[in-house]
Structures are given as C-alpha cells and as structure tokens.
Amino acid sequence: MRPLIRSFHFAIQGMAHALLTQRNMRIHFFAAFIVGLACVFVRVSVFETIALFFSVALVITLELVNTAIESAIDLFSRDFHERAKIAKDVAAASVFVAAANALLVAYLVFYNKVFPIQWRPFTTLIAPPFLGVLLFGFLCLLLAVVAHAMQIHLDLRKGGHL
C-alpha cells in the first residue's frame, strides 16, 4: 500500500510543480475552479457536468504532458533545434485544441443557463447521484494541489529543492 500512496504523492508533487512553474497551468486551474463553482450554483445536468469536467481534465492533462515534453527536451539540449521546436509546438497545440474545446463546451452548457440565470436549488446538490459531494471533492482537490504548490514555493524560497 505504501508504494501506491507514494505514487499519489509524486503525482500531486508533479501537478504542484506545473502549477508553480507554468503560467498557463495557473490559468487552467483558475478556470477549472470557476467551472466547478459555476456547476455548484447554476442548474446543470449530470451529463453537462461530466462534459465540463472531462474537458477540464483533458486541458490540465495535456498541459502536464506539454510541460513534461518541454522539460525532457530542455534536459537534453538548451540549443535551438528545429525538431525540438516542432515537438514543443505540437505539444502546445494539443493544449490549445483541448482548451478551445473546453471553451466551446462551457459556452454550450452555460449560455442558456446564465442568460437568464437559472440558479440551482440546494436540494439538487444533495439528491442522488450526490452531485454536490462530487463538486465539493473536485474543488477540494484543486485547493489541495494549490496548497501543496504554495508549500513547495515556500520551501524553495528557503533554499530547499523538489
């Protein structure tokens, strides 16, 4: 069981590192937080919530992959190489496509709900399938990664290392 817990720790540490070092990851996390809050307060169906969370997860996942690719390429060479540029640009393009998709999904889900606003009654959050619990868990996960990133940032400022 211990190796499994360690692997989760390393995964959260990787997300925290990306959050600390990648401006776009901070933008994606902020957008994910706003989407999560919007799902709590605006009446969205379970399927709309799934579409939104899948889109958010895809963007964040591809941003992590993009960061990993860029770091791996930088590890081997700091000099300009056309193929390295292509690899970095293609990885960034994958994030761009996912982010454009996420914006489209958010527009399709929220446009008619926000104009005019249709507020969600609290009872729909606590009724099966307990969407409120899932949304709360999602927001807590985002906050946990942010807190971990802040702790790493403080440790690094004190002279520590990852």
Image (cartoon, rainbow, N blue to C red):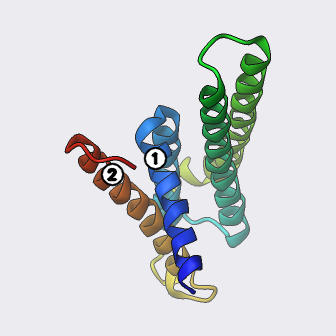
Which quadrant: the N terminus?
bottom right
Q: Write the residue at 68% across / 72% down.
A: 46
The image position of residue 139, as x and y in percent, is: 45, 65
**Depicted 91 relative to depicted 53: above or below:** above
Please state which of residues 14 and 137 is positioned toward the viewer in this rendering. Answer: 14
Q: Write the residue at 57% across / 69% down.
A: 7
**Depicted 100 relative to depicted 128: above or below:** above
Is residue 150 among what the camera can see?
Answer: yes
The dot on residue 142 is none
Instruction: List the residue tagged with mark 2.
Output: 152
For the residue marked with disc 1, what is the amino acid? His
Instruction: List the residue tagged with mark 1.
Output: 17
Is the C-beta separation of discs 2 and 1 under 8 Å? yes
Q: Write the residue at 74% across / 20% down.
A: 84
Marks 2 and 1, the one that precedes in the sequence: 1
Q: Is residue 2 left or right of residue 91?
A: left
Please state which of residues 124 and 94 is positioned toward the viewer in this rendering. Answer: 94
Q: Residues within 10 Å of mark 1 (few under 14, many from 20)?
A: many
Q: Is residue 132 left or right of residue 96?
A: left
**Depicted 36 relative to depicted 86: above or below:** below
Q: How many marks?
A: 2
The Cα atoms of the two marked residues, 2 and 1, are separated by: 8 Å
Give SS at disc 2.
helix
Q: Write the residue at 67% across / 69% down.
A: 45
The image position of residue 59, as x and y in percent, is: 65, 45
For the residue marked with disc 2, what is the amino acid? Ile
